[in-house]
Image (spheres, helix red, strand yellow):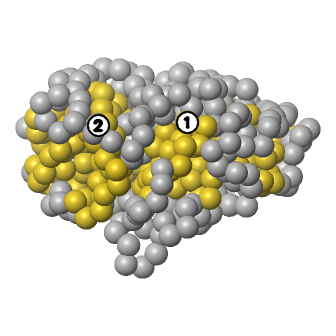
Amino acid sequence: MPHTPQPMNPPESHSGQLRRVGSPLRLSRAAAVGGSIFLAALGVSVPSKPNQAGPLTMGSSQEPYFLASTELDSPGLGPMIGLGVGLAGPPLLGRDGSWWLLGSDGEIGHFRGDDHLIWSISVGSTITGAAVADEQGLLFVPTARDLVYAVEPSGHQRWRFRAPAGISGPLGWMAGQGVVFVGRDRALYWLDQRANLLLRAPLGSRVSVGPAPLGARAVVGTEMGQLIALTRQGKRQSVQIGAPIAAILPTNAGIVALAADKAVGLDAQLNRVWSREHVLGIGVTSSLGQGQRLGSPVVLQASGQMDWLDAAGETVASVTLGRTLPSEPIPVFAATNSCAWISFDSGVLWEVCVNKAVKNIPLARASLTRPIIDLMGARVMVGSAVGGLWSLPLAAGS
């Protein structure tokens, strides 16, 4: 049955509560290695200035972050932005080429596409999962104090919403329809862009991944092996995959899910279209030019083969890695029409391209975040669990 939206607590006061950051994003320099990487100027001090709209204050700077080119496959650590704390997730890209970096301690930096720091703020609490941004650059951030913050592109706080049952995991952005998240009560919550609660829908099972968009519906994966899709009116559909869901990604035809060691492709109605056994990770392609496949699935097989698939699950390109995996791979990787970037728990990044040798890029001695592709910057960005961030140029012909 459809779930009736339930009225809940209104958003809290719009008065700013984000604290001053006097010298954010502590920078460090290490030995040069690992591709074209962020090389931060030492000793950058970011002054604070009052937020004219209220108590919120923030830092701002026009100091650039210089890029340095180095050889791949070099040993050791590379130049990086060093935060001193772990990242709350991979960098978040905006439609205008700008990007956000979120520290697990609650600090947020907003950068231009040329890597100048625009401003930094702190939400004063641990960031508990992936943040999201809408098409206009409004940033939504989940915190350990059970608050969702909406932050303007200028760094001003628009509103904050107290989640009545806390926040369990990341936020999901539903294009033009608002923000979704799962509470600790195992229910999905749907907010509009003004912090009005549109829906509370009990899910019945513990959520393992998501929410992710599937057209106008939000999809989550559960520890019981279910995919559950909900509209903001509460209409529900579910399908049983058969194993705990480890990852879900939207594709150009629906979604691809990773359940234990099985990858499953489903259409927009959650009909199963294809499946692959013995899979370690999944990705979808980002388009870098006209005629390239956007949102097509890519799978990493336990046999050491990477396959680019079409909507029907047929292989259209393939690479045999020819190397032993250095450690457990992060289950979601970045990909283009002909290349993929896989991060590992051991701190190594692999660049895998059709008709080219695999490149092994040691970056850190800690687990890496999921890589992301910055299309405007023509680069791959990846962070580490201990707070480093690297930027590598896209391979030629990607």
Q: Which residue is mark 1?
A: 348
The disc, 2 or 1, on the residue closer to the chain's N-terminal end is 2
| Residue nearest the observer in this picture, 102 or 319 | 319
What secondary structure is marked by label 1?
Answer: strand
Check disc 1: other Cα within 10 Å, few if <14, some if 14-19, many if 20+.
Answer: many
**Quadrant holding the N terminus:** top left
Q: Which residue is mark 2?
A: 302
Label 2, label 1: how far apart the Cα atoms are: 18 Å
For the point 46% across and 43% down, the residue is 342
Left or right: where 23 falls relative to 244: right
For the point 55% across and 67% down, the residue is 396
| Residue nearest the observer in this picture, 356 or 96 | 356
Amino acid type at mark 2: Ala
Amino acid type at mark 1: Val
Q: Position of residue 324 (x, y in %)?
A: 41, 35
Left or right: where 10 falls relative to 215: right
Q: Residue furthest front?
A: 322
Q: Position of residue 27 (x, y in %)?
A: 81, 36
